[in-house]
Image (cartoon, grey):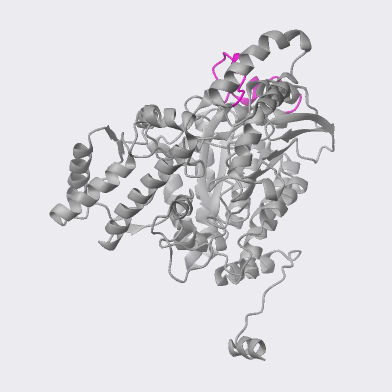
């Protein structure tokens, strides 16, 4: 256990605060056992025995539909078909939690059932501080996760604070209640067979094998026949990387053209990365009994993994960082990932934000999503058609670069239904720019007003977006004016969404690349068919995108400059400070030399 005897007393005292003293004798013994065994008090006895899922919104006992929509989204995040480790309230990413313990879940659901439209639920890292008076126009919930004084935002401090029950890691959409299953993100690479089988049963994997030779054979067959194949390998990915390298060295055949890594390396020493040298059971045992030795073994495994990747890359494979802190943690392990002459956020391989996503973000495109609260697949089909039709209509009057993005997403939406992507709530995601998001939201809201869609719809997005996240090793890794490590954008986004109409907002430390490495936020907004909902959606969504585009413009991104310039022409109340470029670099040299 990470805690001293005195801190274990504190952790136990903290947990018992939720209960009257008459229950303390029984609960203290249970909680102390959980603390010793798991390093955290989850309060398993209070885990509900109901089937946890997103029920239709009218089935929630609430005074306001806004509160009911939050309850629906919380239960979807903890659905066993959706969540990674639902018993530990972990939705995805190894340790991305909805709440820190089950008492918090029960108390939050009680508060939401009692809430009026003149109250706001305040959430401190999983803990419901209570219902506080507010305005009908205010958010119904304000969520913060992992807000820590900067000098104490280290991995070691997180582990201690989490053990004490005073802070938690909300990942991105886990702690903001907005995860929508594998459409949003398929869980990171695992050595555990249970999630692998789950994704196979849900149709996200075509085949599963635990035989590495069979895996190599199927890759070769699919590659030669040009047959689409999603293949899950139950084993350690380091062994697979090394086997692919051996095959190349033996036959000269490069079986992998594109490569990346999805292990949960924001949490490398507590189950996010299992080293190749140990079995799952051996790793779990060493993790608990000798954390220092386990850390060494993880670093050795990372060095092996990078060595194989480097050789395959030299042979012609294109590798990129997924944004899970793989290259960052590999660098800390001593692996050869340095980029000669590179900046603080650059490595031997690009982040996919630097290489792929950056220009999309600068155009205002990001992961926009919605959830049909009726639970009726017909409503999802209808909203799919609404979204595709909207994009088809507005794509006629955009630049070619933007039209290409629209066309990709129109195809995705038109074909999404037949591929049965839904896991959990009736939800959909697409990449859209500012105009597309606003127009889709308004069109769906009108369909609710016209009763073509049978119940309200929650709109949201991933925190991994244009404006939502300041993350120097992912979302803002292509910001080169020295501000990549600044977090003003994400904090301003959270605040701005709150007073422009969001139903709930969240701000998190950590997410993607890990605690202390990123600040990110998100929102949920209930569309109920009213004019007020339309006004909120238009005002908030415009800000939610323009904020990030303006920041990227100021950093020197030419695509963002053009995008925000066009937006100002369309919205006369928008006035953004625009940068002037230094046209003569000699001016800088002369000034500094003088």
Quarter of the image for residue 100 reads: top right
Q: Is 24 positioned to the left or the right of 102 in the image?
A: right
Q: Is residue 105 above or below residue 406?
A: above
Residue at the extreme left: 251
Q: Which is nearer the eye, 390 or 167? A: 167
Residue shown at 48% from the left, 63% from the top: 346
Residue 538 in view: no
Residue shown at 72% from the left, 54% from the top: 492
Q: Which is nearer the eye, 194 or 4? A: 4
Residue shown at 54% from the left, 35% from the top: 95
On-image quarter of the N terminus: top right
Q: Position of residue 300 (x, y in %)?
A: 38, 46
Q: Is residue 285 above or below residue 365?
A: above
Q: Which is nearer the eye, 325 or 541? A: 325
The verdict on residue 63 being magenta is yes
Which is the main secondary structure of the residues drawn in magenta?
loop
Residue shown at 61% from the left, 65% from the top: 552
Q: Position of residue 180 (x, y in %)?
A: 53, 36
The verdict on residue 359 being magenta is no
What range is drawn magenta here?
40-64
On-image quarter of the C terminus: bottom right
Count of residue discs: 0
Q: Position of residue 262 (x, y in %)?
A: 42, 45
Q: Position of residue 75 (x, y in %)?
A: 59, 26
Q: Is residue 495 above or below residue 286?
A: below
């Amino acid at each position: 256990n990470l805690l001293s005897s005195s801190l274990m007393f504190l952790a136990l005292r903290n947990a018992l605060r939720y209960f009257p003293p008459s229950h303390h004798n029984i609960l203290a013994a249970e909680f102390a056992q959980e603390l010793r065994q798991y390093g955290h008090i989850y309060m398993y006895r209070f885990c509900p025995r109901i089937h946890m899922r997103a029920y239709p919104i009218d089935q929630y006992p609430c005074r306001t539909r806004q509160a009911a929509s939050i309850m629906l989204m919380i239960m979807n995040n903890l659905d066993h078909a959706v969540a990674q480790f639902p018993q530990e309230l972990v939705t995805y990413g190894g340790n991305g939690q909805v709440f820190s313990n089950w008492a918090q879940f029960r108390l939050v659901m009680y508060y939401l059932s009692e809430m009026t439209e003149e109250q706001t639920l305040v959430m401190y890292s999983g803990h419901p501080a209570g219902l506080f008076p507010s305005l009908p126009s205010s958010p119904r919930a304000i969520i913060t996760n992992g807000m820590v004084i900067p000098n104490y935002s280290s991995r070691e401090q997180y582990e201690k604070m989490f053990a004490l029950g005073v802070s938690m890691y909300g990942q991105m959409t886990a702690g903001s209640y907005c995860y929508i299953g594998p459409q949003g993100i398929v869980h990171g690479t695992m050595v555990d067979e249970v999630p692998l089988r789950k994704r196979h049963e849900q149709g996200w994997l075509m085949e599963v094998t635990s035989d590495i030779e069979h895996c190599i054979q199927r890759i070769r067959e699919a590659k030669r026949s040009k047959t689409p194949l999603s293949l899950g390998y139950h084993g350690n990915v380091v062994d697979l990387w090394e086997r692919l390298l051996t095959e190349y060295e033996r036959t000269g055949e490069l079986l992998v053209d594109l490569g990346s890594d999805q292990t949960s390396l924001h949490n490398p020493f507590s189950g996010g990365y299992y080293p190749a040298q140990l079995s799952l059971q051996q790793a779990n045992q060493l993790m608990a009994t000798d954390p220092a030795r386990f850390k060494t073994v993880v670093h050795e495994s990372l060095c092996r993994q990078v060595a194989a990747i480097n050789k395959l890359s030299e042979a012609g494979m294109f590798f990129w960082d997924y944004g899970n802190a793989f290259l960052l943690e590999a660098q800390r392990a001593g692996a050869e990932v340095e980029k000669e002459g590179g900046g603080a956020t650059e490595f031997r391989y690009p982040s996919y934000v630097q290489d792929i996503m950056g220009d999309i973000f600068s155009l205002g495109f990001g992961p926009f999503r919605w959830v049909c609260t009726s639970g009726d697949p017909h409503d999802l089909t209808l909203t799919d058609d609404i979204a595709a039709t909207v994009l088809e209509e507005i794509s006629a009057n955009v630049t070619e670069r933007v039209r290409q993005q629209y066309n990709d997403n129109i195809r995705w939406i038109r074909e999404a239904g037949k591929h049965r992507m839904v896991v959990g709530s009736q939800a959909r995601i697409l990449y859209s720019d500012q105009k597309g998001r606003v127009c889709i939201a308004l069109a769906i809201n009108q369909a609710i007003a016209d009763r073509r869609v049978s119940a309200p719809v929650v709109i949201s997005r991933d925190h991994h977006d244009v404006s939502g996240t300041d993350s120097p090793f992912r979302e803002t890794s292509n910001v080169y004016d020295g501000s990549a490590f600044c977090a003003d954008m994400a904090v301003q986004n959270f605040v701005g969404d709150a007073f422009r109409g969001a139903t709930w907002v969240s701000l998190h430390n950590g997410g993607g690349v890990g605690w202390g490495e990123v600040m990110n936020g998100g929102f949920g907004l209930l569309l109920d068919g009213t004019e007020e909902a339309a006004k909120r959606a238009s005002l908030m969504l415009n800000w939610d995108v323009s904020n990030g585009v303006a920041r990227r413009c100021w950093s020197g991104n030419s695509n963002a400059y053009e995008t925000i310039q066009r937006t100002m022409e369309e919205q006369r109340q928008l006035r953004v400070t625009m940068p002037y470029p230094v046209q003569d670099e000699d001016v800088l040299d002369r000034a500094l030399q003088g």
